[in-house]
Amino acid sequence: MSAAIITTPPPLCHPRAVGQSFFLPWPTISRFASSYCTKRDSDAINEHYFSRKSLKCWDKFYKRHQNKFFKDRHYLEKDWGKYFSDNDNGAISADGKVLLEVGFGAGNTIFPLIAAYPKLFIHACDFSTEALNLVKSHSNFDGDRINAFTCDVTHEELCDKILPSSVDVITLIFMLSAVSPNKMPFVLQNLKKVLKPNGQILLRDYAVGDFAQVKLENRNQMISDNFYFRGDGTCSYYFSEDFLSNLLVNAGFEIVDMTTYCRQVENRFRNMTFQRRWIRAVFNKAGL
Ligand SMILES: C[S@@+](CC[C@H](N)C(=O)[O-])C[C@H]1O[C@@H](n2cnc3c(N)ncnc32)[C@H](O)[C@@H]1O
C-alpha cells in the first residue's frame, strides 16, 4: 500500500478560516488554496469563499447604487410577450401565468411585467437582503401578485419556497452569469424542479467577446475560462452558444431559440466605440 503524502494544510483550509480571511483578494486566496490543498479541497474552498464573497458584494452593490443602476427592462414584452401572456392559442384563460424571476435585483424585470400582464403572478428570489428591501419598498410592489423572498439558488432548494412543478416560465436576466460555472448545473436542477412540464426558461445574459470581458481580461481579473471578478467584487461569466447549449441540454432542457447579438456602442465624449454582446435564449423543460 502506498503511503499518502500529507502536507500540512495552512490554517486557510479550515472552513472558518476561509470565512475569516475574507479580506484577501480573490486571486490570492484561489492560488493559495490550489498550492496547499488537494484539488477537491481547493475547489471546495474556492466555492465556499466565492458564494460568501458574492453575497457580500451584491449586498454592498445595492446599498451603494440602490435602484439607480439598471433600467427597467421593457424590451422583455417585445421579445417574449407570448410567454408571459395568459392568452394561449387564442383562448383567454381565467388564470394568468406563474413566473419565477431568479436574481430579481432592484426589480427591473418584475415591475414592467406586472404592469403589462395584469393576470401574471410572480415568484421572485434573490440572495441579497438589500435587493429584497428595495423591491418590497418599491411603490408598485403588490404582495398579492409578487412573492419576493431571499434564496441562494446555488445551494438552497427552491422547492422549500415554491410548490414543485408549479411555475410556467422562469426568467434569468443577467443572473446566471453571476454564478460560478461549477454551480450552474445545480442551479438548473433547482429551477427544473419548480418548473411545470413543458415550462420555459427565458435567458438573457453577457456573451463572449463583450467589451467588458475584453477589459477584465486585459486587467488580469480572470477566475477561470470566461469567468471574471469586477472591481466591486461581483463576478461575471461570458457565455458562448456552445457552452450554454451543452449546459442546458445536459440539465434536461431543449433549445427552442438562441441568438447572440452584437451592438456597436459609441462614446462620443471619449471618441471610442465598444462592442456589446448579449446572448438571448429560450429553453423548454424536456419530457414529463
Ligand atoms: C445583474 S443582477 C440582475 C437583476 C435583474 N434580473 C434585472 O433584470 O435587473 C444579478 C442578480 O443576481 C443575484 N444573484 C447572484 N447570485 C445569486 C445566487 N446565488 N442566488 C440568488 N441570487 C443571486 C444578485 O444579487 C443580483 O441581484
Image: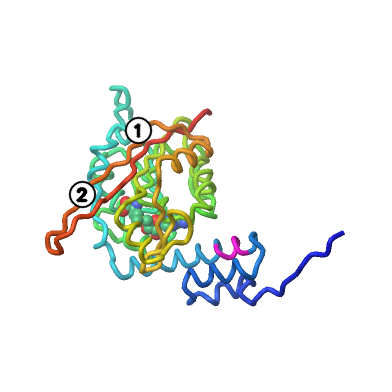
Q: Which of 146 and 261 is in front in this view?
A: 261
Which mark lies nearer to you, 2 or 1? 2
Looking at the rendered image, the quarter that the N terminus falls into is bottom right
86 inside magenta stretch: no
The tag on residue 232 is none
The spot of residue 152 in percent (x, y) is 48, 57
* Badge 1 density bin: few <14, some 14–19, many ≥20, Cα 10 Å: few
Nearer-N-terminus badge (2/1)? 1
Looking at the rendering, the quadrant in which ligand 1 lies is: bottom left
43 inside magenta stretch: yes
Residue assigned mark 2: 264
Q: Which picture quadrant has residue 274?
A: bottom left
Residue assigned mark 1: 95
Q: In this view, does 239 lie above or below 270?
A: above
Tag 1: residue type?
Asp
Does residue 149 show up?
A: no
